[in-house]
Amino acid sequence: MKRGDVRLQKLILRIMALVSLPVVPAVFAPYFTVEKLSWLVGFRQPPKTPLLPYLAAGGSIVYLILSAMLWMISCDVVRYRPLVIFMGWVCLIAAVAYAWVNTVSG
């Protein structure tokens, strides 16, 4: 069975890991980050509720953990082949889910 190009798999996994790094400010300054992003996309001032920084920081920490995991998997894609395949399918399904959420939320 063909295994695919290991270098390409490594590159894709590392790009996916690096793309998640811009969430770092939301971990340490969640309200400030959400406020600036709201301004950038043209929304009004976000509400000053405890839920906003909790969700922003918590979600960002999850992204950082997943990006670290992707980086570690990319170090040995042959060994972690079942996990690489699983992550590929999960990312494809998540892309569809994100598109649906964006569509229904306006």
Image (cartoon, rainbow, N blue to C red):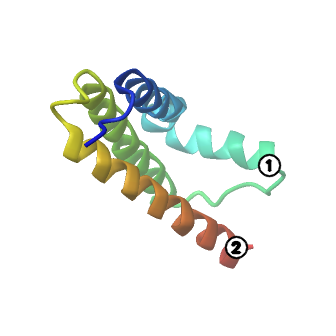
Looking at the image, which residue sits at the far front?
1
Please state which of residues 74 and 7 is positioned toward the viewer in this rendering. 7
Residue 40 at x, y = what percent?
Answer: 79, 42
The crowd level at tag 2 (other Cα within 10 Å; few <14, some 14-19, many 20+) is few
User: What crowding class fits label 1: few (fewer than 14 Cα within 10 Å), some (14-19), or many (20 or more)?
Assistant: few
Question: Is 26 in front, or is 11?
Answer: 11
Do residues under tags 2 and 1 come within 8 Å of each other at their CB atoms?
no
As helix, strand or loop, the secondary structure at mark 1 comes to helix
> In the rendered view, does 91 fall on the left or right side of 104?
left
Specify the amino acid type for callout 2. Thr
Residue drawn where x is 42% and y is 31% of the image: 17
Horizontal side of 63 relative to 2 (left or right) equals right
Judge whether 4 appears above or below 7 on screen. Answer: below
The residue at 39%/31% (across/down) is: 9
Q: Residue at x 50, y 38 (%)?
A: 26
Q: Quadrant of residue 68?
A: top left
Which residue has dot 2 on it?
Answer: 103
The spot of residue 76 in percent (x, y) is 22, 24
Q: Point out the tag, 2 or 1, that comes first from the N-terminus.
A: 1
Which mark is in front, 2 or 1?
Answer: 2
Looking at the image, residue 46 sits to the left or right of residue 66; the answer is right
Q: Residue furthest right?
A: 42
- Residue 29 lies, in percent from the top left, at 50, 35
Amino acid type assigned to the residue bearing label 1 in the image? Val
Instruction: Compare residues 11 and 56 and report the one nearer the observer.
Output: 11
Residue position for label 1: 41
Determine the image quadrant of residue 13: top left
